[in-house]
C-alpha cells in the first residue's frame, strides 16, 4: 500500500517525507486556500520535495477550460498528477489527458458506478471519499470494498484505488485489508499510526532496566 499525505503545508510535507514513508501528495483547492500561498508555487515546491505523484486539481468546471488548466499544471513538474472532479466534463478531460500520457486523479467519487466510468476514462487514480460517507451515517469503507472487487474483475483496468477523506488509522487498516492501492491521509492521521500505549509502556520499561546497568552504547 502506498501512503500519500493530504496537505498543502510544505513544512508538514518536508517533515513527513524525511521518514521515507510518503509516496506522494494530494492537494485540493481547500488545502491550497488554507496555505495562503499561490497555487503554482505550492505545487512546484511540493514536487521538489516528493518524488512520487503530486495531485494538482483543476478549478474550471467545463471540459475545454479543465483541459487547458490540466495541460498547464502538468508542465510544472514531471510528477504532477492532474486532479479532476467526477463529472461528465471531468471524465472527458480525464480521457483526453490520459490519452496524452498525463496521469489523472479523478476525485469526489461516491459510487461504484462512478468508479467504473473513471477506469474506462483511463484514470490513474480514483479517489472515493470514505469519511464523508461516515459523516452521514453510512459506512464509507463499503464503497472501497466494492470498487476493489470490481477492478479486480477486469485486469485491463489500470486505475489505482486511492482512499480519500480518511479520518483515522482504522480507515487505513481496513483499506489495506481490502487491497486498496493507496491511502491519502492528513498528517495528523499518519502520526496517530505510530502510537500505541503498549509501545510506550514497553519502551519505558526497557529504558528503566538499561539505566540500572550504568552502561552506554557509545
Image (cartoon, rainbow, N blue to C red):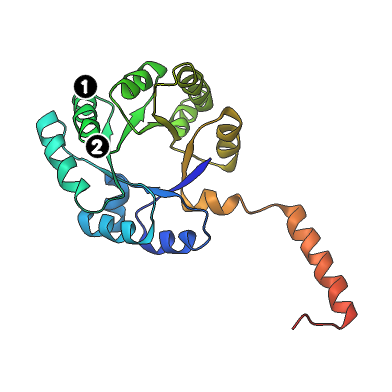
Give the structural element (helix, strand or loop) at label 1: helix
118 lies left or right of 143: left
Tell me if 51 is positioned left or right of 81 in this view: right
Circle nearer the N terminus (1, 2): 1
Q: Residue at x 51, y 52 (%)?
A: 188
Q: Position of residue 138 (x, y in %)?
A: 50, 22
Numbered label attached to residue 88 = 1
Residue 213: give x, y in percent of width and height.
89, 79
Q: Which residue is mark 2?
A: 101
- Viewer-nearest of labels 1 and 2? 2
Tag of residue 150:
none
Mark 1, other Cα within 10 Å: few <14 / some 14–19 / many ≥20: few
What residue sits 85% from the left and 74% below the top?
210
Relative to the observer, which residue lies in front, 96 or 113? Answer: 96
The image quarter containing residue 184 is: top left
- In what element is the residue under mark 2? loop
In the rendered image, residue 196, in percent from the top left (x then y), is placed at: 70, 52
Q: Nearer the viewer, residue 18 or 103?
A: 103
Compared to residue 4, the image places residue 62 above or below, namely above
Counting from the top left corner in percent of width and height, residue 151 is at: 45, 21
Mark 1–mark 2 Cα distance, whole angstroms, equals: 20 Å
Residue 121 versus residue 80 in the image, above or below: above
**Image point 38% across, 51% down: which residue?**
7
Q: Quadrant of the C terminus?
A: bottom right
Residue 104 visible in image: yes
Which residue occupies 77% across, 80% down? Answer: 217
Amino acid at each position: 500500500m502506498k501512503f500519500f499525505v493530504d496537505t498543502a503545508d510544505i513544512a508538514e510535507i518536508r517533515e513527513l517525507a524525511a521518514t521515507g514513508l510518503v509516496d506522494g501528495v494530494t492537494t485540493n483547492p481547500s488545502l491550497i486556500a488554507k496555505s495562503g500561498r499561490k497555487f503554482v508555487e505550492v505545487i512546484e515546491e511540493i514536487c521538489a520535495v516528493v518524488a512520487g505523484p503530486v495531485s494538482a486539481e483543476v478549478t474550471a468546471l467545463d471540459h475545454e477550460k479543465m483541459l487547458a488548466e490540466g495541460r498547464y499544471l502538468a508542465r510544472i513538474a514531471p510528477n504532477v498528477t492532474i486532479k479532476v472532479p467526477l463529472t461528465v466534463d471531468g471524465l472527458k478531460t480525464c480521457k483526453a489527458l490520459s490519452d496524452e500520457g498525463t496521469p489523472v486523479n479523478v476525485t469526489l467519487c461516491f459510487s461504484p458506478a462512478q468508479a467504473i466510468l473513471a477506469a474506462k476514462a483511463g484514470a490513474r487514480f480514483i479517489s472515493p471519499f470514505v469519511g464523508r460517507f461516515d459523516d452521514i451515517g453510512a459506512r464509507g469503507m463499503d464503497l472501497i470494498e466494492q470498487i476493489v472487487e470490481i477492478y479486480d474483475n477486469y485486469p485491463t483496468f489500470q486505475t489505482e484505488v486511492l482512499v480519500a477523506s480518511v479520518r483515522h488509522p482504522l480507515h487505513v487498516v481496513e483499506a489495506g485489508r481490502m487491497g486498496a492501492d493507496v491511502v491519502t491521509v492528513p498528517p495528523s492521521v499518519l502520526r496517530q499510526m505510530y502510537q500505541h500505549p503498549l509501545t510506550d509502556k514497553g519502551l519505558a520499561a526497557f529504558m528503566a532496566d538499561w539505566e540500572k546497568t550504568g552502561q552506554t552504547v557509545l
